[in-house]
Image (cartoon, grey):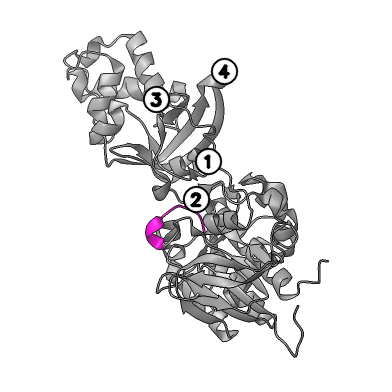
Amino acid sequence: MGNNMNKTKIAVIGGGPAGMLAAGHAAELGAEVTLFERNTLLGRKLGITGKGRCNLTNDCTPDEFIKNVTANGKFLFSAINRFSSADTMALIESLGVPLKTERGKRVFPVSDKATDVVLALKHYCLKNGVRIVCDRISELIQKADGTLSGVRSEKKDYVGYDAVILCTGGLSYPITGSTGDGYRMAESVGHTVTPRIPSLVGLCSDDFVCRETMGLSLKNVAVSVIDTKKKNKVIYRDFGEMLFCHFGISGPLVLSASAHLRPMESGRYLVSIDLKPALDAQALDKRLLSDFEKYKNRNFINAFDELLPAKLREPFIKLCAIPTDKKIHSITAEERHRICELLKNLPVTITGFRPIGEAIVTSGGVSVKEIEPQTMRSKKCPNLYFAGEVMDLDAYTGGFNLQIAFCTAHAAAEAATNADAFE
């Protein structure tokens, strides 16, 4: 396809993390690259990841990485071994962004600014000579022999390309440009797109506790997710921060948990919140006895002034099913046991996911059965390649989803630039 006299011409569709890395690396390898982005800014979604801090990868081994991929992890074996988390970190630091590793091996820029990563990747493209075109590509132009000759927008046709890399993202955060264009383009050349569902998303609940505590953030709590259809099996457990919302629950712990709730069925999953994970049942009972002794002449409504945040006290007392005007000194041992049980297992019944537009990640996408895992090349269309979230690949929180984008983009760029290398 390409030689020194006649450079390989590559069109990259989508200027997110996968698109910028694919374009920058292909150009670095000597290809003539045009990067098409529908927004006027590159990396809009990347700029808001990790609450604007950008958890760009996870400092783990390739094997650990694959264990954290929830859909089609084995497909990534070649890509992650050829461009690991360590390679991502080395590249970003070489572009002038110092990195740091936090709890759970999550990697962030030292500056805590996602924009630093966005600008570094943009600079990577520009310094290697990538041409950036702000236009929304809506179609792939296919020749009679099945190969692609170019891409089409509402304004014009862009032709004369040897390869196209599709990096259009999923359906999450549509305001940033992820509106599913890539799925339609892939289907137009014969690809199967698996059903798309939200992942890393808030969870809905009709429980009054959520409504009455709306806006309350809980730190240092433990959360367990119980699958009531599987003999109350605990399918997820972690410790950290969560939030009560008008629709149910959200926050880092809940977003991580959401990736495990499959298939989603209303009422199937119960989230159990341990409000006092530092205390075992015995220590908690001792603490309650001490508080109850201190406030023995108060009414039960005032029993938790030291133990619970103000917003949670009344809903919690309702759950205890103990009269609010009962004197604390007359609380029975059985009632105290019930209180302890609720402090360690506050239940929230889940009715469903929040909409896909609010999800951090889209689960589902172009079927990986139709993509070569070493090269990210389409098995349906010889000079089409894929990278990132447009494929049916997703992972838990912690930097794994961006690492999927980076390692697949690297593989696609290498293969598209040197198309006969893997023949």
Inspect the magenta stretch and tell me whether residue 133 lies in it: no
Counting residues from the N terminus, which is met first, the one under dot 4 or under dot 1? 4
Along the line of sight, the residue nearer the viewer: 135 or 406: 135
Q: Secondary structure at mark 3?
A: strand
Q: Which residue is mark 4?
A: 231
Q: Which residue is mark 1?
A: 259
Along the line of sight, the residue nearer the viewer: 109 or 187: 187
Q: Secondary structure at mark 4?
A: loop
Q: CA distance from mark 4 to mark 3?
A: 16 Å
On residue 347, which mark appears?
3
Q: CA distance from mark 2 to mark 1?
A: 9 Å
Residue 184, position as x, y percentages in the image: 53, 55
Rendered residue at 58%/57% (across/down)? 188
Counting residues from the N terminus, which is met first, the one under dot 3 or under dot 2? 3
Residue 408 appears left or right of 140: right
Q: Secondary structure at mark 2?
A: strand
Q: Secondary structure at mark 1?
A: loop
On residue 361, which mark appears?
2
Q: CA distance from mark 3 to mark 1?
A: 19 Å
Local packing at callout 3 (Cα closer than 10 Å; few below 14, some 14-19, many 20+) is many
The quarter of the displayed image where residue 112 is located: bottom left
Counting residues from the N terminus, which is met first, the one under dot 3 or under dot 1? 1
The span shown in magenta is: 169-176
